[in-house]
Image (cartoon, rainbow, N blue to C red):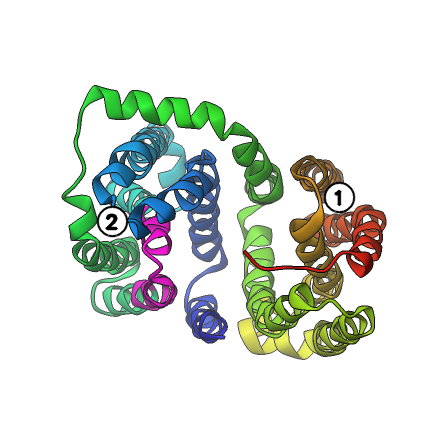
């Protein structure tokens, strides 16, 4: 629930900047945010799960150096190298088109902003790369706290630098906020990081692990990467003001995902441990009772909510928020189905679901954006969750019936 609270605080900061900044600047910040999210999908490489699957048993046995040499260091260094390459490409592309960017955003000093925006992208990726180290050490609370604290620190620093130094220093603020978060996390992980050896063999080992875990990478890319990619398409196809409309609606609805997970995860855990079909059915009904009504109610309130979040300049875009809220009613279904499939199904079955949903989301978003402009992305998200729900129904039903005959035991 803590991440849900931080998501709501983050929304408040977003609302502040929506009122404070012109739409074009708010839209440009949205492009940067989407670029950062998309880069993190690339730097996953399947090695996130590689570390989580292999390092914990070795660490529990006290074989810390072996865990670092064989899994943690190779995975971390390969991913960090890719993050550095993406950062250089991002900044280089910015300078390549700096004249066009300066002409479109005369309020900003593009040459001043680009290095800080690039550093922010790099730091965000490094934080994501270090996350499985906390989880492997079973420091779950620490990882969750600093993930949430980092978001809060980033937003606070952005507001402070903006208020004291102006809009150009917004990007300095987000870099400083995340940089402080990275420094704290590095100090907390110093006992593990000092075991790293920077030899060519470590990098070669990372490439070998990459080949072994490519299926995890493909799954992650289609599950999350396509969603980030179709958001970037909006920046290419639509005027920046329309992107700003969508971004505010997206931020105004995304906190709901954390709330749904806060209600749903405990119930699905209970479901996974139950061997009584009637009891599992009761848990499933309880899950849907608490999760589905919330987005439906919010969808009806979306005209008022959008006006409250962005004022008059965003009020007419309430329809986007309404569609996004409605899509989260379908998300509750697909999220429940994914829990069942993850527990019982084969990896290939869940992989194909992610591939289908990713492709449907990408293609539909492209077509719908062209037809419905900024509303098309929202319709694309709704169609993606609908596709996941329909595609997952047969598999979910199959494994729920199988579970009735097969007692579930924990490892």
Label 2 packing within 10 angstroms: few (<14), some (14-19), many (20+): few
- Of 302 and 77, nearer the camera is 77
Where is residue 104? Give x, y as percent.
Answer: 43, 42
Give the main secondary structure, helix, strand or loop, of the magenta stretch. Answer: helix
Residue 233 covered by magenta stretch: no
> Along the horizontal axis of the image, is 166 left or right of 405?
left
Q: Residue at x 25, y 33 (%)?
A: 69
Q: CA distance from mark 1 to mark 2?
A: 54 Å
Tell me where residue 268 sits by quadrant: bottom right
Label 1 packing within 10 angstroms: few (<14), some (14-19), many (20+): some
> Along the horizontal axis of the image, is 378 left or right of 78?
right
Counting residues from the start of the chain, the first of labels 1 and 2 encountered is 2
**Residue 54 visible in the current orientation:** yes
Residue 368 is tagged as 1
**What residue did someone put label 2 on?**
62
Q: Residue at x 29, y 67 (%)?
A: 153
- Secondary structure of residue under mark 1: helix
Q: Which residues are magenta?
A: 130-154
């Amino acid at each position: 629930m803590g991440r849900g609270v931080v998501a709501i605080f983050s929304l408040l900061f977003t609302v502040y900047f929506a009122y404070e900044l012109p739409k074009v600047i708010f839209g440009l910040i949205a492009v940067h945010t989407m670029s950062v999210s998309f880069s993190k999908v690339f730097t996953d490489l399947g090695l996130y799960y590689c570390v989580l699957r292999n390092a914990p048993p070795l660490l529990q046995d006290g074989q810390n150096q072996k865990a670092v040499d064989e899994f943690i260091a190779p995975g971390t260094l390969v991913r960090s190298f890719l993050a550095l390459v993406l950062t250089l490409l991002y900044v280089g592309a910015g300078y390549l088109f700096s004249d066009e960017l300066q002409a479109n955003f005369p309020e900003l000093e593009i040459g001043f902003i680009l290095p800080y925006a690039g550093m922010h992208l790099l730091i965000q990726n490094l934080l994501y790369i270090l996350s499985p180290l906390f989880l492997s050490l079973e420091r779950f609370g620490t990882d969750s706290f600093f993930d949430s604290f980092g978001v809060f620190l980033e937003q606070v620093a952005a507001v402070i630098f903006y208020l004291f130094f102006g809009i150009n220093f917004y990007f300095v603020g987000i870099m400083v906020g995340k940089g402080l978060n990275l420094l704290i996390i590095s100090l907390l992980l110093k006992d593990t990081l000092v075991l790293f050896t920077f030899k060519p063999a470590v990098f070669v080992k990372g490439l070998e692990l990459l080949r072994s875990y490519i299926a995890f990478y493909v799954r992650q890319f289609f599950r999350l990467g396509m969603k980030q990619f179709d958001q970037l398409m909006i920046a290419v196809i639509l005027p920046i003001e329309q992107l700003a409309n969508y971004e505010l609606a997206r931020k105004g609805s995304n906190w709901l995902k954390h709330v749904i997970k806060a209600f749903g995860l405990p119930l699905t855990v209970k479901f996974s441990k139950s061997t009584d079909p009637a009891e599992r059915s009761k848990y499933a009904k309880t899950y849907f009772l608490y999760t589905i009504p919330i987005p439906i109610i919010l969808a009806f309130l979306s005209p008022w909510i959008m006006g409250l979040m962005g004022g008059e300049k965003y009020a007419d875009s309430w329809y986007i928020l309404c569609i996004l809220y409605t899509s989260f009613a379908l998300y509750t279904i697909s999220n429940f189905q994914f829990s069942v499939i993850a527990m019982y199904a084969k990896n290939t079955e869940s992989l194909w679901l992610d591939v289908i949903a990713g492709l449907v989301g990408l293609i539909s978003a492209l077509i719908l954006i062209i037809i419905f402009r900024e509303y098309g992305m929202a319709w694309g998200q709704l169609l993606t969750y609908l596709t996941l729900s329909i595609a997952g129904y047969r598999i979910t039903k199959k494994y729920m019936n199988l579970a009735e005959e097969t007692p579930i035991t924990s490892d």
